Amino acid sequence: MKKVEVVAAIIKCNKEILCVQRAENSLEYISKKFEFPGGKIEKGESKKEALQRELLEELNITTNIKSLFLTVIHEYPDFELTMHSFICEVKTKELTLNEHIAQEWLTLGNLENLDWAAADIPIVNKLVNNG
Ligand SMILES: Nc1nc2c([nH]c(=O)n2[C@H]2C[C@H](O)[C@@H](COP(=O)(O)OP(=O)(O)OP(=O)(O)O)O2)c(=O)[nH]1
């Protein structure tokens, strides 16, 4: 099966976490799902370099990348996803949505209310359970 490796940012501003909604897609299982911003690692990039590049492209922001939070391996019907999630911090909520169709800043208690991409559920669960 095809393998895809991505990095994703759990961006905190005070006690809130940024959740962004993907655009419509022909793969229904990721279409319009909520996710953590990020994307594929390009050749020659470190994970953190890839994450900073993706956050600039998608949101026009630079974050303070703190630490690796969780690596998830998830089998979608068409590919196997490996996703490395990092805790990041920003001082303001200012951003531009260049690719996503909506944003939510949620506290831990409200994270589970969104319709997340399946691969994100272990990350959401760990956040909710361990902060
Ligand atoms: N960035 C990101 N991708 C996720 C998450 N959850 C999840 O299932 N994915 C999947 C959706 C996509 O199939 C893949 C990442 O693709 P992408 O479209 O964000 O990456 P990209 O910008 O580098 O892609 P491309 O269209 O430029 O090829 O991982 C998540 O929380 N963040």
Image: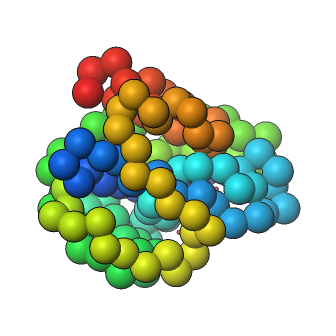
Residue 24 image point, x, y percent: 76, 64
Q: Residue at x 65, y 40 (%)?
A: 115
Residue located at (36% from left, 81% from top): 60
Which residue appears at 45% of the width and 60% of the height?
37
Give 111 or 39, whichever is nearer the viewer: 111
Number of labels in the image equals 0
Q: Quadrant of residue 15?
A: top left
Percent coordinates x, y for residue 92 in the rendering? 22, 67
Is 40 located above or below residue 29 in the figure? Answer: below
Please say if 82 is above or below 21.
above
Left or right? Give the position of 39 relative to 64.
right
105 sits to left or right of 76: left
Q: Residue at x 71, y 56 (%)?
A: 32
**Vertical placement of residue 126 versus 67, above or below:** above
List x then y, in percent, for residue 84: 38, 46
Question: Which quadrant is the C terminus positioned in?
Answer: top left
Q: Relative to 15, does residue 123 appear above or below in the rendering?
A: above
Farthest residue to the top: give it.
129
Q: How is the image coloured?
A: rainbow
Q: Is residue 31 visible?
A: yes
Report the image quarter containing ligand 1.
bottom right
Is residue 69 or residue 124 the one in the foreground?
Answer: 124
Image position, residue 95 (x, y; %) = 36, 75
- Does residue 6 appear in this view? no
Q: Quadrant of the N terminus?
A: top right
Q: Nearer the viewer, residue 17 or 117?
A: 17
